[in-house]
Image (cartoon, helix red, strand yellow):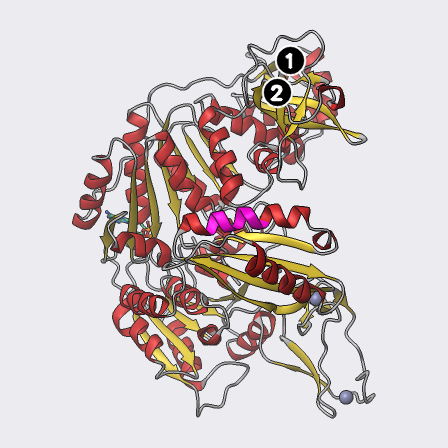
Amino acid sequence: MSILRLAIPSPLRRLFDYLPPEGISVENLQPGIRVIAPFGRREVIGVLIEVAEESEFSLNKLKRVKSLLDNSPPLPQHLFKLARWAASYYQHPEGDAIQQALPVLLRKGNACEFQHETLWRASETASTDQLKANAIRQIELLQLLLEHPQGISTDALKAEGANISALSSLAEKGLAESFQRKHSHHDEQILHEAPLTLNSEQQLCIEHINGQHEFAINLLEGVTGSGKTEVYLQAIEKVLRQGKQALVLVPEIGLTPQTVSRFKQRFSVPIVALHSNMTDRQRLDAWLQAREGIARIIIGTRSAIFTPMKAPGIIIIDEEHDASFKQQDGFRYSARDLSVMRARDEKIPVILGSATPSLETLHNAIEGRYHWLRMTQRAGNSAPPEFKLLDIRQENLSEGLSAPLINAIRKHLESGTQVLVFLNRRGYSPTLTCHDCGWIADCNRCDAHMTLHQRPPHLHCHHCDKQAAIPQRCPECNSDQLQPVGVGTERSEQALKAMFPDFPVIRVDRDSTQRKNAMQEIMHKVNTGDPCILVGTQMLAKGHHFPKVTLVAILNADSGLFSADFRGMERTAQLILQVAGRAGRADHPGKVLMQTYHADHPTLQTLVNHGYCAFAQEELHNRKMAQLPPYTHYALLRAETSTQGRAESFLAAIRQQLEDDMLLPHDASWIGPFPSPMEKRAGMHRAQLMIYAENRKSLHQLLANLCWYLEQNKESRKVRWSIDVDPADT
Ligand code: ADP
Ligand code: ZN
Ligand code: ZN
């Protein structure tokens, strides 16, 4: 009797055995196809892992698969394998990992095929003269159709404000017709515009990359403005000429219309961008276009790493250091690290690009495991920015700004250029305090203060999203002397407006860009080139090109130097350099002024005077001394419960168990348990146990044992636990 072994989305780290559906021969069933199977009291969609000859359960206990959803597997073999590998590497239940590699509609059981979209166009001879002058709605609609000779969907018509109920009248008069769009291969025209002439550094990099015909890992380390994008574009061009496809992953914050249009400007091949504004249907269609080889360039964020390609040619990870490539909950995979696995399996090159590479990647380059390509000069005419620390220990700050900084801002605005003011805190003020008794507005669900927002006025916890009204009086002493302490972007915006009434002040943070198209409107204002002040959070640091910005003012970046997280220093350095890199990106030389209370901090000095690589080598040395990653491999076992102390005692028991029972690899060890950096969040008390090993194999052996143990253990059902392999933060 044949058994179907299925991966089913469930928290259990195991496969499930079923009998085949009645009357189906199992010989031709391919691993990877989706099936519908009864599971508990529900029916679920599972994926066939293998057809087995026997089960450890007796046959009469096994249920039968209800039906098959696919003839052939939606995920090509390589990706099916990648998802399974990732499940085991990240200690995540396989059924869930495979599901997450699929577009949402396939997870829900939809057919794995295109929905050919219905489009409308004007008929060949139609003109608005054929309509009565008072048929305004029909005239407007026909005009729109005439503007879209390739056809336009009803959704797109609605978005243009058209009244689509008039479509049928137009069709009756023979002025409009509908047809089905079929996705088809385009002509072999590749370029839309001529490539730039490369400078010598770019030239060396591209020669290197374009000489690779199989698996190779490249670190493209290029200072901000060195023209990494042009290198990507020319590497992609070569791949396209060979009839292959390119996958480009960008950070969450970097997938802007600006980024995508840069690729569309260069190439005339079909490009799909997988972004969060798409419907599930659009996503599936884009995914299918990639799988069928119709889309030639695929641009997306983290989850796009699982997009299949019919003819894979290259994978590019832009800003490879960015933390958004690591999923922070559920299936905690790193798209960057998976890209290397995928490229190895598909035998193609991968480029990891950054001005500030992660220490892991840099370490691999230094050790010679990655090709290390470096670009130290800015491309074109622009010069590197001049970087200066402003010691503010003796300064009186006015709304977070020191006098020398205010003067510098004035000077740049008056000379007709733009200024970028960076501070990493949104809202009006990070705390609301009682002047009389010292009470502070805290979140009752987190170990955190509530942030005061003025637009609209409310208190907001940035950790659990709780919102509350602003109290009129102190709840402790009834005083009315409640004061905002500290400066956020809203407050800075207000202060800058008062200081520079003749210049526009534009705020850029998550709050000011929530509205659809808000970012485009902002970019439009900035692109006029008129002098203005941009004030905002790290949203300003990534992906945007502000050619007229000559001064970058950094208000409060140095707190990260003393973070409890061992990556704090690395992240702070990356952030500072990314923000600084916005200065002087075109013909105008740029200047960076960074306010700091720690002007003589040796690390800061190295960073400012000798650059990222010098900083990184020092920091790598520190990591080596402390036996931290990348010199060890580690994972966090996290636990959370609603009762204080419970998570920690649970982990302590696990630790005891490890010590007593388990065959421990000799190089594995642990630290903790400790309360998490923010012990209480969203009402849950949290703790963690850090498990590490010199050898990756040892770590994984230990984690696999641990998972098995946790699943058997009764206590572990009473807490929420998770394992995070190669965590991005602690
Ligand atoms: P990076 O991503 O490395 O920070 P970009 O790719 O955004 O840098 O390039 C910075 C600027 O330099 C862009 O305006 C780009 O058009 C320009 N640029 C890149 N390469 C060249 C080149 N070879 N010649 C002239 N300009 C270039
Ligand atoms: Zn008070
Ligand atoms: Zn909270």
- Write down the quadrant of residue 640 in the picture: bottom right
Give percent across and percent down for residue 52.
58, 20
- In the picture of the structure, the residue carrying the numbered disc 2 is 54
Magenta residues (range): 699-706
Q: Nearer the viewer, residue 641 or 198?
A: 641
The CB of the residue at mark 2 lies under 8 Å from ligand 3? no
- Write down the quadrant of residue 433 in the picture: bottom right
Q: Nearer the viewer, residue 125 or 489?
A: 489
Quarter of the figure with the N terminus: top right
- In the picture of the structure, the residue carrying the numbered disc 1 is 1
Residue 661 is marked as: none
Label 2 neighbour load within 10 Å: few <14, some 14-19, many 20+: some
Does the rendering let one see residue 611? yes
Q: Look at label 2 and name its amino acid.
A: Glu
The CB of the residue at mark 1 lies under 8 Å from ligand 3? no
SS at badge 1 = loop
Q: Look at label 1 and name its amino acid.
A: Met
Whether residues under marks 1 and 2 lie with C-beta atoms below 8 angstroms apart, the answer is yes
Does the rendering let one see residue 254? no
Residue at left offset 33%, top offset 20%? 188
Looking at marks 1 and 2 on the same chain, the residue that comes earlier in the sequence is marked by 1
Give percent across and percent down for residue 540.
47, 60
Residue at left offset 38%, top offset 73%? 412
Residue at left offset 73%, top offset 51%? 714
Give percent across and percent down for residue 4.
63, 20
Q: How many marks?
A: 2
Give percent across and percent down for residue 625.
34, 70
Does 294 appear above or below 669?
above
Does 217 appear above or below 18?
below
